[in-house]
Image (tube, rainbow, N blue to C red):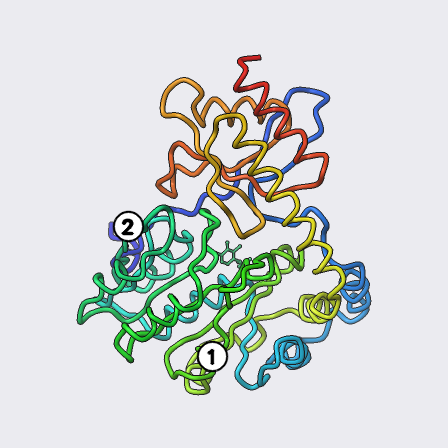
Amino acid sequence: MSRPVPNPGILDIAPYTPGKTPVPEPGRKVFKLSANETPFGPSPKAIEAFKHVADHLEDYPEGTSRVLREAIGRAYGLDPNRIICGAGSDEILNLLAHTYLSHGDEAISTTHGFLVYPIATMAVGAKNVIAQEKNLTCDVDAILKAVTPKTKLVWLANPNNPTGTYIPFDEVKRLRAGLPSHVLLVLDAAYCDYVSRNDYEMGIELVATTENTVVTHTFSKIHGLAALRIGWMFGPEHIIDAVNRIRGPFNVSTPAMYAAVAAIEDTAHQAMSKQFTETWRNRLTEEIGKLGLKVTPSVANFVLIHFPETGKTSDAADAYLTRRGLVLRALKNYGLPHSLRMTIGTEEANRLVIEGLRDFMAGK
Ligand SMILES: *Cc1c(COP(=O)(O)O)cnc(C)c1O
């Protein structure tokens, strides 16, 4: 008997594997350091706003996320009419793929790019083309070389996950200038709030001055609202118009919308989190480096730790730390079989990881 058959390309997609559920030794407190979630949670004001909305769950949301677009506009100095909100930036990325890619097209991402990009690309029957990175960092020349007449879109997380590296804004501009004008450049700025480098920018200026670049952002990281699924994009008017035509009319829930407004207005909470992250990013990089392990310099809220291919392997380290309740992210499906990604956690968690890795390397 025949049965329904998925569209071409769908079964070529490797299913997304989220961070594992840990099984530590009895009595160990569990620290989930595998999904780049903030150890601080959201702003208390966001939780308050969320609860407030609970009295009216029978009402459909306002369909354009107007209050949130206006709050984002105030925070970044943007025209709210050029913003779209979505159920996580995941939804936005998929909406962009549906709007601009189809069967036979190509979209470029980098060797260790975010896994949602190939999924979004292949879900619409387009081909995922990989541009090689250099030193675990985006190589603009490699992207430009990968362009063919079929290229329609370039995905670039800056900073990138899971590497934690970034490219300066001059390089982003050079990439834009080198791409054909009909190719959409998607700048994913999920981790931009953690970056403190003078040569970094999330790319808003490029969106404002070109017709072919968008910036996406999320409330899942520094704002601590991953459970609510909320993200946004800033783009040229014609792109906003096109994507709005396929966006679900009520794609963002009211609690998510109002929690996000309160979160983005709590700049003190963001500043505290950024400062803490920077302090511990430096400390973890230094202390783990002292153990003889290589740590890729990160500008985000996580660090990438590299292990030897034999002996003290990443698999052994992962199992060892898991027994102590410290759950890091193995990166085999990101093409980094000898590395672990550690989300910067609470002070207690961070200290325990350093201690755990010290014991592991010492063979204890
Ligand atoms: C976490 C992350 C996001 C955010 O995704 P949401 O769907 O908004 O939770 C986007 N891009 C990258 C690269 C990420 O790591």
- Viewer-closest of 197 and 55: 197
Residue 253 image offset from top left, x and y in percent:
65, 69
Residue position marked by numbered label 1 in the rendering: 235
Q: Nearer the viewer, residue 159 or 167?
A: 167
What label does residue 359 carry, if any?
Answer: none
- Residue 268 point in image, percent of width and height: 76, 62
Circle 2 SS class: helix
Q: Name the spot of residue 145 as percent of width and height, x first.
A: 21, 62
Q: Residue extending furthest left?
A: 149
Residue shown at the point (42%, 86%) measured from the top left: 238
| Separation (CA) of disc 2 from disc 1 | 30 Å
Q: Tell me if the residue at label 2 has its CB under 8 Å from ligand 1.
A: no
Q: Position of residue 331 (x, y in %)?
A: 43, 38
Query: In front here: 335 or 209?
Result: 209
**Which of the numbered marks, if any, corresponds to residue 12?**
2
> Identity of the amino acid at label 1?
Gly
Q: Residue furthest top?
A: 364
- Please determine whether, in this image, residue 184 is positioned above or below residue 325: below
**Mark closest to the chain's N terminus, 2 or 1:** 2
Identity, as a three-letter code, of the amino acid under mark 2: Asp
Q: Above or below — where is 313 with respect to 69?
A: above
- Res 70 → quadrant: bottom right
Image point 69% across, 53% down: which residue? 275
Q: Quadrant of the C terminus?
A: top right
Viewed as shown, does residue 21 lie left or right of 17?
A: right
Q: Secondary structure at mark 1?
A: loop
